[in-house]
Amino acid sequence: MGFGRRLPEFITGSSSNKFTVTAAAAFIVLSLVLIATVCSPISYLPLKFALSGTKPPEQTCESREQRSSYLKHRSPELPPYLLSKLQEYERRHRRCGPLSESFNTTSPLGTHNDFSDGGDCKFVVYTPSQGLGNRILGLTSTFLFALLTDRVLLVDFSADMDELFCEPFPNSTWLLPGNFPFRSDFYGGWFRDVYSYGKLLEKKEKTDGDSSSSPALLQIFLQDKYNEYDKLFFKDENQGFVERVPWLVLIHDGYFIPCLFQMQSFRSELEKLFPDQETVFHHLVKYLFSPSNQAWGQITGFYEAYLAKAEERIGFQIRVFEPKQTPFTAVMKQITSCTQKHRLILPQSDEVTLRNEKSKSILVASLSRKYYEEIDWMYGTRRRQSTGIAVYQASHEGKQHSGDNSHNMKAWMDIYLLSTSDVLVTSSMSTFGYVAAGIAGVKPWIVMIPDPYHPRGANESACERAINLEPCFHFPPWFAYPDPPGTGGPVGRCEDVSWGLKLVGGHKTRR
């Protein structure tokens, strides 16, 4: 298979297989849907289910309507230009997306596999592989790339992502059809050999060939182990070629938006979209990700039972990547040093002040149960009689379970519960913590978790307050670093990852 303008032929059925539904049958189906909705008030019917090529009756996304009552910090208004671009995108998604007539006739699922007749619809398919925090960061980055390049975003979710989110775009779906060609091969070696942009550049260099003709489909591989050729995607001079390709499959699980701000081809548009470059992620993550009704029922149920009555909510998000090499006592020392130094929770010895302290609910989000038990003993059990402090944990899975839908549902519940906090304490390098802070609109205190592979200096502080709500891009290409670093501009070094990049606005970073 080569880089032609035509994809291989696939037997996917024809338009003759479409059927019409009689009024009686439609009434029966609609009745069953309504009965199911009444009997199960927190169920959510994704838009992937279509009847005769149309979506089912719109389901209300309860979290969109109710979340302002749970997220305590008022979000800044969407910039007017960003709002207009989002509305323009929604129209494009309805016109080109999987529920449209255009998609049925010009995608490789229809009768016309020749992309030269595809009109002005172009696509980027996002396919994830890592944990939920990484996926949300990668998907957010991919959406912004789609917004900048007039593409339609489609997501290749497997069963482990079922029922987590409401559909973000009205009257359409972002889900890639299950019978899309090559879907099961996106991570395959042969697919990368044939369709990878990095491989294309490498072959061109070795053969001094001409890559001016545009293929129908390209894989953009940007995972943490991407090579020097893959990284050239972030070079301005290569975007003209990428722009001509109708189908991109983007594989990435991180926040590459800082690199987009470093590209002159996107910089001016990004500055119009986001005059305040410290709220890029906050705006996008709240626009894209609303808990499904099923997830929202679990989130609000836990919140009302355990967190709602407190005058102040404190969220601890503790992620230890190498638990066997990272002593439990060392992690707890960093946490207690952080909370006491910055008086996030008053020490037991301050009895006079404690009697006048607000009632607090402390939520511990961690794969391990022992951090909850230790924090409960330190701040909850020992002090519950004299103060209104209570410590809770919604789940403790022991370890990260890849490909497990129930695990991802619990992770999403933890992220959103953390985002209801007044004060957030998160872990260095944790994408989970980045997402919770971004949704909450709360600048977190980032605890520097001891790392056996990247030891910090003896004078390193136990924690550091994030300068803004922006996540860190952990694995940027070398040419994306600002020169000289930390002297202003939109991009600087991260607080918690010395080699990472983040949007810093006008701030000067220390590194």
Image (cartoon, rainbow, N blue to C red):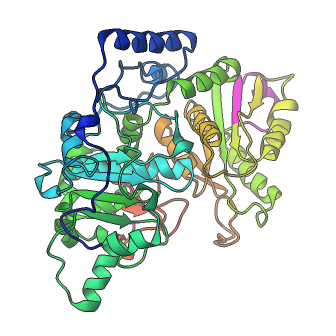
Where residue 367 appears, as percent x and y from the top left, is 72, 47
- Give left or right: position of 200 versus 221: left
**Magenta highlight on residue 367:** no
Where residue 39 appears, as percent x and y from the top left, is 57, 10
Where residue 437 appears, as percent x and y from the top left, is 52, 41
| Residue 364 visible in rendering | yes
What residue is shown at x 82% (from left), y 56% (from top)? 329
In the image shown, does 472 or 111 lie closer to the viewer? 111
| Vertical relation: 246 (above or below) 84 | below
Where residue 357 appears, as percent x and y from the top left, is 71, 25
| Vertical relation: 314 (above or below) 39 | below
In the image shown, does 24 or 404 lie closer to the viewer? 24
| Residue 348 visible in rendering | no
What residue is shown at x 57% (from left), y 15% (from top)? 40
- Give left or right: position of 272 versus 166: left
- Looking at the rendering, the stretch of residues picked out in magenta corresponds to 346-363
- Give left or right: position of 192 versus 301: left
| Vertical relation: 202 (above or below) 248 | below
